[in-house]
Amino acid sequence: MECSHDCSNCSENCSDRKENFLAPANALSNVKHVIGVISGKGGVGKSTVTALLAVTARKNGYKVGILDADITGPSIPKMFGVHQIADAMDEETILPVESATGIKLMSINLLLEDETEPVIWRGPILAGTVKQFWSNVAWGDIDYMFVDMPPGTGDVVLTAFQSLPLDGIVVVTSPQELVGMIVAKATKMAEMMNIPILGIVENMSYFTCPDCGSKHYIFGKSDIREYAKKAGIDKVVELPIDPENARLADAGQIEKAFSEELFDIIQ
Ligand code: ADP
């Protein structure tokens, strides 16, 4: 095919593709796998799933990092109970902050003096910040880097898809969403960018009665498995409504939770 060298309108899987947009990795970073976590809208549990993936990978002995690309709604540091300001090595390089169990974190909230200050930057600056979190952070040796994307399929997500060397994507949905649409959008985007979807997580899928142990599909049973099958995605994980995990996340103690079932998605 004739090549216009404009990959934004082309889905060809050619060898030049990623290199065109990839942000350079920091000289002090050696990251083996980069996994993006996306969702159709906010509040479905994308950050919780990112944190649980990271915590479980760490429990399995891996070196783990989380790049919080959700610049306008960062929630990763709070879940890990980390509130200090990241140290700078020099004018161009910052060091990630380590959690209690040694997970390396970078988030806009680790750079702002006042973490309640809203970030009201425009799209290109937000997207540039995500690139800097890759290029200007000395991550060191990382086996699994999880990228907590902003919700939806806007500017920043697109830039992150193009500029980070993603190995795969995990899609997080909830039963209240229009699951079919989200799966279709995510699949199209992943195809265009030539990045595989590793699995779909339906969060808050059901509630297990603490008295009798039976599962209750409070929002009705969704067709998630059907949609996943149609899209050629093998792995689907249904996570329950879990007030204890929500409490741990709120208390900055998400490292006390884990989910092997989730971790299986990326294995
Ligand atoms: P997102 O990143 O998609 O905006 P969060 O992960 O921040 O969503 O989750 C939104 C809220 O829902 C948080 O208070 C979180 O603790 C809570 N939450 C997420 N997943 C669950 C779950 N499975 N059970 C109960 N609460 C949950």
Image (cartoon, rainbow, N blue to C red):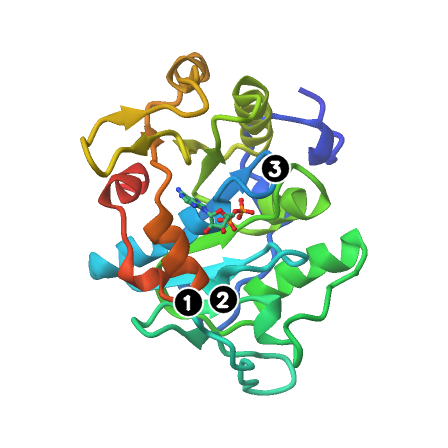
At 35% across and 29% down in the image, what residue appears? 206
Q: Local crowd at mark 2 within 10 Å, few (<14), some, or many (≥20)?
A: some
Give the left or right position of residue 50, taking residue 137 as reference: left
Does dot 1 land on a helix, a strand or a loop?
loop
Nearer to me, 72 or 157: 72
Q: Residue at x 66, y 70 (%)?
A: 116
> Could you say where residue 215 lies in the image, as x and y percent from the top left?
27, 26
Q: Distance between the residues labelled 3 and 1?
A: 23 Å
For label 3, the crowd category at 10 Å Cα-Cα, with few meaning under 14, some 14 to 19 and many 20 or more, is: some
The span from disc 3 to disc 2 (Cα, nearest Å) is: 20 Å
Which of 251/6 is in front?
251
**Who's the residue at 32% across and 63% down the image?**
255
Label 2: which secondary element: helix
Choose between 87 and 135: the one closer to the eye.
87
- Disc 2 designates what residue? 78
Q: Do the residues labelled 1 and 2 touch (CB within 8 Å)?
A: yes
Confirm or reject: label 3 Cβ below 8 Å from ligand 1.
Answer: yes
